[in-house]
Image (cartoon, helix red, strand yellow):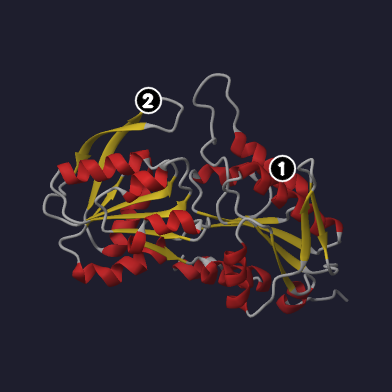
Amino acid sequence: MPVIFSARHERMKYGDIKLYSGTSCPELANRIATHMGLELGERDIVQFPNENLFIQLRSSVRGQDCYAIQTTAAPVHRNLMELLILIQTLRLDSAARVTAVVPYLCYARSDKKDQPRIPITARLVADMIEAAGADRYMFLDLHAGQIQGFFSIPGDVLTAFYILSDYLKVKKSKMHKPVVVTADLGFAKKARNFAVSMDVPLAFIEKRRVSNDSKAQALSMIGDVRERDVVIVDDEVDTGGSMIQAVNLAKESGARDVYIVFVHPVLSANAVDNLAALPVTEFITTDTIPIPPAKFKKFGKRMTVLSIAPLLGEVILRAHEGRSVGELFNE
């Protein structure tokens, strides 16, 4: 007679949820654990004088459902290696399942061969995460959706734009004829969805990238922003060049108050100094990447950071219990 396993028995094969964090986003990891009513697993992470990394767990994870939480922003290569070693450490200690929880995935812009003799580094990163021993992945707002196809393991690509749009819906009543503006035509679909969620019009900034040094030239505004409050949206702000041009063009086009909304605060090079000098009413982002206190201070009271911890905590719980993640987004 065949043995029939219930969904509960199927889930139980993974044991309990165990959360482990690298050193790149300890505050976010703690928020996730607090939201879930759990404690982070204890581990030792040591960097030797030769810059080699060493990780040791302080308790066994045999048979457990483990989640390695690590963002891969600067220092990129240190944080990426730490993620890979943490995943392998969990795998070699006989974890039943290991999920890589990476709020910000490095090299996501290197997703295709659009020039001769260049690599597809995002594919290489995907291969390394799998080779380290990950069974699943969990990312937020990948720069290019096709990166999901680089993985042969299942996973969840989430979005924080619901969190950002919900925040702006509350502010909408105090805004004057708001309009959503995308600083990149490649981001038009997500910007449209953002505008629909806010029930406001959409405008575009045409730009043309002219070199490999992250600089781009904003060319023209497509849409009406005159005498309107403008909400400029993008997935990430790196050097800030595109955002600076977008703000200046919006102001030249007659915009009133300007809000900058983005998921990933990469904020490389002189981005903070340059952005803080802009006539922007509010910068709204998330904690996928921690902003150092010295950088945060330069924005004064104009910087708002919304936490993705409740979202990740809920998705981790649903993944563990075998429940739908799409239901969170009415999908």
Q: Secondary structure at mark 1?
A: helix
Dot 2 and dot 1 residues touching (CB under 8 Å): no
Residue in view at x 56 percent, y 43 percent: 147
Inter-mark Cα distance, 2 to 1: 31 Å
Pinpoint residue 288: horizontal percent, then vertical percent: 52, 58
> Left or right: where does residue 181 sit relative to residue 45?
left
Q: Is residue 152 left or right of residue 96?
A: left
What residue type is disc 2 on? Val
Seen from the viewer's position, the closer of residues 277 and 116 is 277
What is the quadrant of residue 183 in the picture?
Answer: top left
Callout 1 amino acid: Met
* Residue denoted by label 1: 128
Provide residue 260's location: percent of width, then percent of height. 32, 54
Q: Quadrant of residue 166?
A: bottom left
Residue drawn at x 26%, y 45% as measured from the top left:
247
Q: Nearer the viewer, residue 306 or 273?
A: 273
12 left or right, relative to 193: right
Dividing the image into 4 quarters, which one contains the N terminus?
A: bottom right
Total marks shown come to 2
**321 vs 247, nearest the viewer:** 247
Q: Position of residue 146 (x, y in %)?
A: 53, 42
Structural crowding at the residue carrying mark 1, measured as other residues with C-alpha within 10 Å and reported as few (<14), some (14–19) or many (≥20): some
If you read the primary sequence from the N terminus, does the residue marked by circle 2 or circle 1 appear first? Answer: 1
Q: Residue at x 20, y 45 (%)?
A: 250
Nearer the observer, disc 2 or disc 1?
A: 2
Q: Is residue 315 left or right of residue 18?
A: left
Q: Using the image, determine if residue 270 lies above or below residue 96.
A: above
Mark 2 lies on a secondary structure that is loop
Q: Position of residue 271 (x, y in %)?
A: 41, 44
Q: Which mark is residue 139?
A: none
Residue at 22 percent of width and 60 percent of height? 200
Circle 2 sits on which residue? 210
